[in-house]
Amino acid sequence: MPQYKRRRSTREISKNGNGETIFEKQNEAFPISNGMKSIGEILPDIEKKAAEAPKGRKRQTERGELMRFFLRHLNYSRKNDGLAPMTMAHLGTVLEKIPTQDLYYLKSVCSQAQNFGKKFWWELDPKKH
């Protein structure tokens, strides 16, 4: 089986900011000729802030805070009724189709009701509306 030699050619890639042609063999970086600052100069602390932000289960989100609110109130009434506590995963599947803005409405309606859990489940049932 014949072996083929690779051709070595210096082909033009592009022109840099000074109008010089850059060839494939050259490994120099393009100079910043248009006066723009690099992203690192504009946002110097971005890596530090990203490292400090909580990850995974500790991350705080608007929807997560609402879910914890509902979970706390529902589990309080479930405990009084002798039922097992609801998990975040179960509550997440129950609330997955509901937009966050509607959760704020649900929170206000349930907070004003005498029985939080009863009102919560009544509001979620589409047959009632």
Image (cartoon, rainbow, N blue to C red):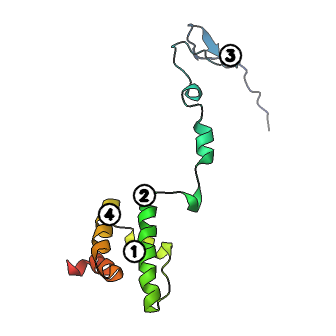
Q: Which residue is mark 4?
A: 104
Q: CA distance from mark 4 to mark 2?
A: 10 Å
Q: Nearer the viewer, mark 4 or mark 3?
A: 4
Q: Which residue is mark 3?
A: 10
Give the amino acid at mark 1.
Answer: Val
Q: CA distance from mark 2 to mark 3?
A: 56 Å
In the drawing, does residue 34 fall left or right of residue 12? left
Neighbour class for label 4 at 10 Å: few (<14), some, many (≥20)? few
Element type where label 3 sits in the image: loop
Q: Nearer the viewer, mark 2 or mark 3?
A: 2
Give the amino acid at mark 2.
Answer: Glu
Question: Is residue 73 placed above or below 12 in the rendered structure?
Answer: below
Q: Which residue is mark 2?
A: 62
Q: Looking at this view, is 118 or 114 the one in front? A: 114
Q: Are marks 3 and 1 in contact (CB under 8 Å)?
A: no
Q: Tell me which label, 4 or 1, sits earlier in the chain.
A: 1
Neighbour class for label 3 at 10 Å: few (<14), some, many (≥20)? few
Q: Quarter-wise, where is residue 69 in the image? A: bottom left
Question: Is residue 70 placed above or below 30 in the rendered structure?
Answer: below
Q: What is the total number of numbered labels drawn onto the structure image?
A: 4
Residue 54 position within the rendered picture, expressed as x and y whole percent measured from the top left: 58, 53
Residue found at x 80% / y 39%? 1
Q: Tell me which label, 2 or 1, sits earlier in the chain.
A: 2
